[in-house]
Image (cartoon, rainbow, N blue to C red):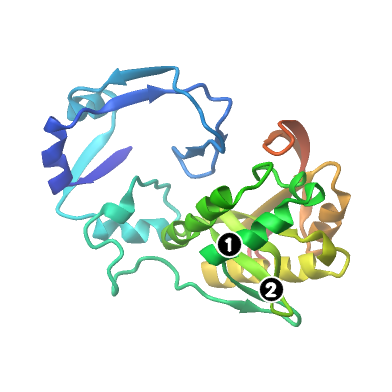
């Protein structure tokens, strides 16, 4: 394993206390990218220990530390099949300067009836309105309940970083000028990603989910260059399974996952879809 750091930051480390945090694994969801886990709720550490000499600690963990003048040469890694994770990359010198390959340009997708555009912070009230319906949110694995404007703004604010890093692309589904839901592909790593979607209950039963998901599938395969997609739904949400099968996804077993809104484990049915030229 390798770690990279800007020389300017390495120079500051001797005067900066660094701590190792130990957490119980249960609250965390492992993403496909190596070393990346996420907890969707506050988690208290089991232990906090000073690291001391960072170089020595990394060497003891068999991690090669590479010191660079800047991290810009590494930006292409996030668009490759290599496993990579980053911390506070927006603070790296020049990371977001125009002219550097800092991710796929934010784009808008269009279907016969829908516009799929990147979310904006101003969408928070509408997202809260949609997800305040328990019938919608209980089917979303990691959505907070009840939703609040602050939580939704935090979620929306994270989209730009996901987009720049190439780990997730989330689109607001717009019909007739109104935001009616979300369709996305995320957990992107090693040529694979996971698609999801949710809709305002008033928009159910009109084929919008399949139409939006088809646009996401085409985007993921044709523009992002992924070779395999996965998805899943709660076992008590057969309508979502019908949408996935209509789109060509194949059943891939089931698992148990934590449902944040329900506050318990649920059965989740899994599906996958290979790109037509590689399936």
Dividing the picture into quadrants, the one containing residue 192 is bottom right
Dividing the picture into quarters, in which one does residue 31 lie? top right
Could you say where residue 37 lies in the image, as x and y percent from the top left?
50, 37
Which residue is tagged 1?
Answer: 170
**Cα–Cα gap, marks 1 and 2:** 13 Å
Dot 1 alpha-carbon crowd within 10 angstroms: few under 14, some 14 to 19, many 20 or more: many
Q: Is residue 110 above or below residue 236?
A: below
> Quick one: 39 or 188, which is closer to the camera?
39
Secondary structure under tag 2 reads strand
Q: Residue furthest bottom?
A: 112
Q: Classify 169 as above or below 85.
A: below
Look at mark 2 in the image and give the residue it sits on. 174
**Left or right of 143, for residue 65:** left
Residue depicted at 24% across the width and 25% down the height: 57
Classed neighbour count for the residue bearing mark 2: other residues with Cα under 10 Å, few (<14), some (14–19), many (≥20)? some
Q: Is residue 81 visible?
A: yes
Residue 195's x, y, as percent?
66, 57
Q: Say which quadrant the C terminus sits in.
A: bottom right
Image label count = 2
Q: SS of the residue at dot 1?
A: strand
Looking at the image, which is closer to me, 18 or 121? 121
Q: Position of residue 98 (x, y in %)?
A: 29, 73
For image coordinates 12% across by 31% down, the residue present is 14
Q: Is residue 110 left or right of residue 98?
A: right
Q: Going 53% across and 25% down the picture, which residue do you hit?
A: 25
Q: Quadrant of the N terminus?
A: top left
Residue 267's disc number: none
Disc 1 vs disc 2: which is toward the camera? 2
């Amino acid at each position: 394993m390798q770690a990279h750091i800007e020389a300017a930051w390495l120079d500051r480390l001797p005067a900066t206390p660094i701590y190792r945090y130990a957490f119980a694994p249960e609250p965390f969801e492992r993403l496909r990218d190596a070393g990346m886990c996420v907890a969707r709720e506050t988690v208290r550490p089991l232990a906090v220990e000073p690291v001391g000499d960072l170089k020595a600690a990394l060497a003891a963990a068999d991690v090669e530390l590479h010191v660079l003048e800047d991290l810009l040469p590494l930006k292409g890694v996030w668009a490759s099949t290599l496993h990579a994770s980053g911390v506070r990359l927006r603070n790296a010198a020049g990371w977001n300067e125009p002219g550097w390959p800092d991710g796929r340009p934010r784009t808008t997708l269009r279907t016969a009836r829908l516009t799929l555009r990147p979310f904006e912070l101003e969408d928070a009230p509408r997202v809260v309105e949609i997800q305040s319906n328990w019938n919608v949110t209980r089917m979303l694995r990691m959505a907070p309940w009840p939703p609040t404007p602050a939580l939704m703004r935090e979620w929306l604010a994270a989209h730009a970083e996901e987009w720049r890093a190439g780990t997730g692309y989330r689109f607001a589904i717009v019909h007739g000028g109104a935001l009616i839901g979300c369709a996305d592909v995320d957990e992107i790593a090693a040529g694979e990603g996971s698609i999801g979607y949710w809709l305002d209950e008033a928009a159910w039963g009109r084929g919008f989910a399949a139409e939006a998901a088809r646009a996401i599938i085409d985007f993921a395969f044709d523009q992002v260059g992924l070779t395999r997609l996965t998805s899943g739904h709660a076992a008590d949400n057969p309508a979502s399974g019908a949408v996935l099968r209509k789109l060509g996804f194949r059943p891939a077993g089931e698992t148990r996952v934590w449902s944040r809104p329900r506050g318990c484990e649920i059965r989740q049915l899994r599906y996958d879809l290979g790109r037509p030229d590689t399936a």
